[in-house]
Amino acid sequence: MAAPNRGRRPAGAQGKPGRALALILIAMVALTGGMFWAGQLTPRLGIDLAGGTTITLEAKNQPGQENAVNETNMNTAVGIIERRVNGLGVSEAEVQTQGNSHIIVNIPKGTNSEQAREQVGTTAQLFFRPVLTVAAGGPAAPEPSPSASAGGAPKDDKDKETATPPSGSPSGTPSPSATTQGRAVTEGLKAPAATPSPSASTSGSPKASESPKPGESPVPTPSADPATAALEKQFTTLDCTDDKVRGTLGDNVKPTEPAVACGKNGAGEWEKYILGPAEVNGKDVDDAKGQLDQQRGMWIVTMDFTEAGAKKFQKITSRLSQQQPPMNQFAIVLDGEVVSAPQVNQTLSASAEITGNFDQDSAQNLGNILSYGALPLSFEEDSVTTVTAALGGEQLKAGLIAGAIGLALVIIYLVVYYRGLSLIALLSLAVSAILTYTIMTLLGPAIGFALNLPAVCGAIVAIGITADSFIVYFERIRDEIREGRTLRPAVERAWPRARRTVLVSDFVSFLAAAVLFVVTVGKVQGFAFTLGLTTLLDVVVVFFFTKPVMTLMARRKFFASGHPWSGLDPKRLGAKPPLRRSRRTTAPTTDPKEA
Amino acid sequence: MSRLGNLGARLYQGEVGYDFVGKRKVWYGVSILITITAIVALAVQGLNMGIEFKGGAVFTTPKADVSVSQATEVAEEISDHIPIVQELGTGGLRIQISGVDTAEADRVQAELAKALNIEAASINADLVGPSWGEQIANKAWTGLGVFMLLVVIYLAIAFEWRMAVAALVALIHDITITVGIYALVGFEVTVGTVIGLLTILGYSLYDTVVVFDSLKEGQKDITKQTRFTYSEIANRSINSTLVRSINTTVVALLPVAGLLFIGGGFLGAGMLNDISLSLFVGLAAGAYSSIFIATPLVADLKERDPQMKALKKRVLAKRAAAEARGEAGEDQQGEAPDDAVPDGAAPAGAVVGPRGRGRGRPSGRR
């Protein structure tokens, strides 16, 4: 009754299988071509397969600054970390946000991961605080009273850093300054930090005459001591040489309150400080960099302030410049640690430079910290994974072997169970594999996709999902044959139902992958991505490859006649001969139409 | 294989079959028992949470000339914590130290390298802060919640609310069982385990959805016939997709088994192993629940529907009448519907009831 219609449908679809196949063939060729064009023949490997370090950072709000973890700040942080990491000469380091409050930093092998970690970890709060007291950082300073000359005693002038106005423009007239400078340089050999720069700026700075003084003799400071007793007590017992103590020191320190802090001096020795409330913060720094001052032949750090920052900086420097050492210093505090504590000899405003015992590294480092350490966010290392290239290679190998074994088992099962039909399943799997591989490879340069171990797992697991679609279809076809249909109508009739089942179940599977991808972080995401991708490709392959090929194969005698090895032998499938025989009386009318 | 092929045919024709729906109470009981065991195990023993959830460090060394006990001693001395040291298939060692924070771990790594006489750079380190695992777990729970909600909505739209409910129950059942097995056996729970567990979500439902799809097809025009009750149709849906369900599960388990074998045998431990282990357990549970729990549950819910109640009454009444009429008309009746039902794949016999069996026997002999 409905047979004629059904009979015609395959005929109508006869043009289609070719078209669909051509389409998928073009897609495959295009993707492969794209692969060669992009010069990327293998998928980019993740850190766990290629070796390297992955750092997962979690952003935390600073006390008093809720809601700081937002998209803008996170993006800025990513930018900052990226510049820093790449500033280390790490090529291809990757920094991305993940979820709302995580940043993932991937550093490929071959770079100093420890240094990178430090750089990444120190993206934090930057404050300029006036120095109240300085002492040697040891556990029990011999004379821990705030008035102790400890601040000056262990230190050499050499290690002092000094903030001055930029010397670039004033020293544009080399000869006049040369006279003053000549002396300064010789002195500078002994005390390169304190003296040369102030004198270099002589021409420009009215206060220059005062400047050499503070550097010369660190006079013991009678503590004018606004610090509370508690702070002093903390200061006395503070042991800056202890990593653990330092690690927790910066926690929960409010910028508006005085604080104790540790820092290394130019000679690399730990010193401890009592610092006043923060007066300038990292955001006030417009730009800063470490650069080589050609004229003086030394590394300096230049800073430019924003308009608001300039005012604040002017205020603090005008006050500090009147003070006696060590209270004429301001400390640049990053994450509770003093990274530099230059003296101020004069009022400074919009731009300034810090001179001292810098080498290229330390100058650039300080420049980086000054310009990028200006976020209202602090980060905590959630996980750090370091994988050597050897283990990465091993894991990749293991993944590939596991995949090969899994695939082989599936193939054996399909061949044994479906016989000839398995040929179609295998071809489909192959097409699916090619598409997955090429797309993954191309996604590397396109969106930074990197194949990691969970992703490999996802791909292996996906073999099952992909194969299942064929199983659904094949079982449907067999059901139709059991109903007594010949192959060609069976193939066409089975399709709409198999199609629906495949779509519904793939949708559920894709939904799981999508939810996982959106909600989770890190390794789980890589897995979810592969699973989602392969599920989509499964639909594509079933629609544009398996079905058309099945239609074409149904025309071949081997399958159509139900050869015992075709996997479609009606007898074997239990399409009962009596049923067919009993139909045969009516069949002649339908069979020719179907054929 | 031909026997299996035949079995498929006979299952499809309804000649053989297992009365999944009829015996549902037994399977509900089994499931409840397993679930209770799982919950008790979880409550009593708890889960063996890995380093990733406790915070700490995992170091993987290349081949070293140190025994496990030596390495344990050394690591304990250095870190002040009790380490877990395993030997890997590669000859290297996997040293887990919990309670070490990420900053301290650097020092431990350096000293470990010195003590074990290997290069620090050749040690793989996995340092995890104490809150990381919690975050992953929290996100996983969120994911689970969101997914369940979406799936219930989707299934309610695509199928009907009863199926959505049944699928959800089956899903929770699978996860409980998997978690319970982890608690019982004491497998270590890692991020890989969580990944595997979350994947089960998709898989378990995938299986369930296929059975439901067939059920949806079977229940088309159900009220217009009086031969089968809803439960019988549901049962036949399960049986007719049984071959596919088995095939799917086998095909899904094979690659996972490959992963498990390689992950466990070749690398000793790690992500591959963890993912595949939880997948393996979960997939098995998923296949079981979609057949034994989800569909019978739908039937249970559906039978409460007044329409279905009425249908059942009609069917039973008709059967009683037919029985009264005697055996004579039965064969004809058995043949007739095959042609009468327009949809070719529709009823070809039931598993339940004397008629189905009576019809199956003669054809089975041929």
Image (cartoon, rainbow, N blue to C red):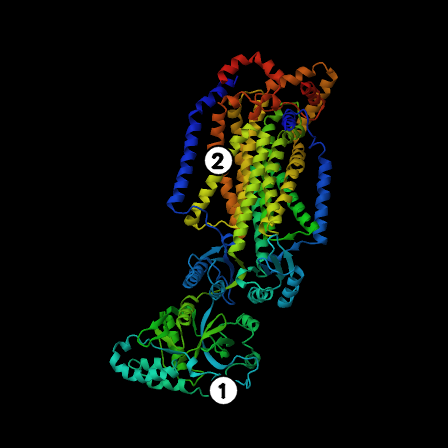
SS label for mark 1: helix
Picture quarter containing residue A191? bottom left
Task: From the top left corner, tell me how far across and down residue B116 is, in percent.
Answer: 60, 64
Task: From the top left corner, tell me how far across and down residue A2 is, in percent.
Answer: 52, 19
For this rendering, which residue is in front, A284 or A133?
A133
Q: Is residue A406 visible?
A: yes
Q: Is residue A207 visible?
A: no
Task: From the top left corner, tell me how far across and down residue A481 is, in percent.
Answer: 57, 23
Amino acid at pointer 2: Val
CA gap between label 2 and label 1 equals 79 Å
Q: Earlier in the sequence, mark 2 or mark 1?
A: 1
In this view, B296 is above or below A68: above
SS label for mark 2: helix
Q: Which chain letter goes with mark 1?
A: A
Q: Return the residue at label 1.
A: A149
In this view, which residue lies farthest toward the front?
Answer: B65
Q: Return the residue at label 2.
A: A541
Disc 2 residue crowd, few under 14, some 14–19, many 20+, Cα 10 Å: many
For this rendering, which residue is in front, B61 or B216?
B61
Disc 1 residue crowd, few under 14, some 14–19, many 20+, Cα 10 Å: many
Amino acid at pointer 1: Ser
Task: From the top left corner, tell me how far across and down residue A67 is, in percent.
Answer: 49, 61
Q: Which chain letter goes with mark 2?
A: A
Q: How many marks?
A: 2
